[in-house]
Image: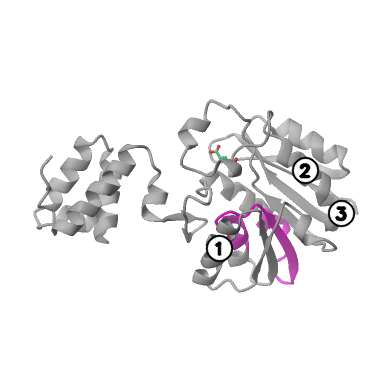
Amino acid sequence: MTTPTTVAQALQHAREAGLARLDAQRIVGGALGRTHAWLLAHDTDGLAEADAQRIATLVARRAAGEPLAYLHGDQEFFGLNLHVTPDVLIPRPDTETLVHWALDVLPADRPCRVADLGTGSGAIALAIASQRPLAEVTAVDLSDAALAVARGNAQALGLTQVRFAAGSWLAPLAGQRFDLIVSNPPYIAEGDPHLPALRFEPITALTAGRDGLSDLRQIVAQAGGHIHGNGHLLLEHGHDQAEAAAQLLRDAGFTDVSTRFDFGGQTRCTGGRWRG
Ligand code: GLN
């Protein structure tokens, strides 16, 4: 394949490599730092050799299945632009369901304490912090590399009320209690047929034992001791795990257990209130 010398040729090469039209436009536009509208107006513009090479590399990576979010290094979530690397799960729109629920239970006019377990890029913690300036949010992750990404996002967004802790679930929060604990933990069963499609994302952020429930079990078992009376535990889970998650919460002593649906109409989050 000859090196493209115009914007139009770069787009065409990307299409010939098997990319969807929108992916091709996003990669070429992203590499040149230009909008979709600019691409349409400037398709006969010449392309510098270095830009052409950079685009060719990105096109090859996308054609091999790498998510656009990792190629661009960012992903939008709840109106926030988040930096993402392969050390963190790419934030999903489904997870906005969990943020909406968190905002429903958090006061807007007084301080409160929130913990986000397995924060990854920081998506949930930062979305909550952006909407509740009086909330003090603690974001926990086992992965130092993930925490570095989350910290960078907090800094870039100026969300100074978010602090960070390294460790497994509630282990680094000994002696602390919260008004709300939220988590989007790994919940896919090992060997699940969907995993190959997610192969670019960190496996430790995705799988949780043979039934996908092992991390949810641990979180529910630990959480009660860290929630104020009448505080909430809200969890994201797989589309077919709502009943299991609800049972875990009831067995652990949570009340008012209920489930919410994601934008795709799947049961996606289950939560309850701690009697205290
Ligand atoms: N919702 C993600 C997916 O199925 C999985 C995220 C998770 O395991 N927490 O692609």
* Position of the C terminus by quadrant: bottom right
- Taking the image in four quarters, ligand 1 sits in the one at top right
Mark 3 neighbour class, 10 Å CA radius: few under 14, some 14 to 19, many 20 or more: some
**Dot 2: few (<14), some (14–19), or many (≥20) neighbours within 10 Å?**
some
At label 3, which amino acid type do we have? Gly
Q: Which residue is mark 1?
A: 148
Quarter of the figure with the N terminus: top left
What range is drawn magenta here? 102-128
The image's mark for residue 172 is none
Q: Is residue 211 visible?
A: yes
What residue is disc 2 on? 218
What element does badge 3 sit on? helix
- Tag 2: amino acid: Gln
According to the image, what is the colour scheme of the structure?
one colour
Q: Are marks 3 and 1 in contact (CB under 8 Å)?
A: no
**Residue placed at 34% from the left, 37% from the top?**
64
Identify the residue at the far front of this view: 144
Mark 1 nearby-residue class (10 Å; few <14, some 14–19, many ≥20): some
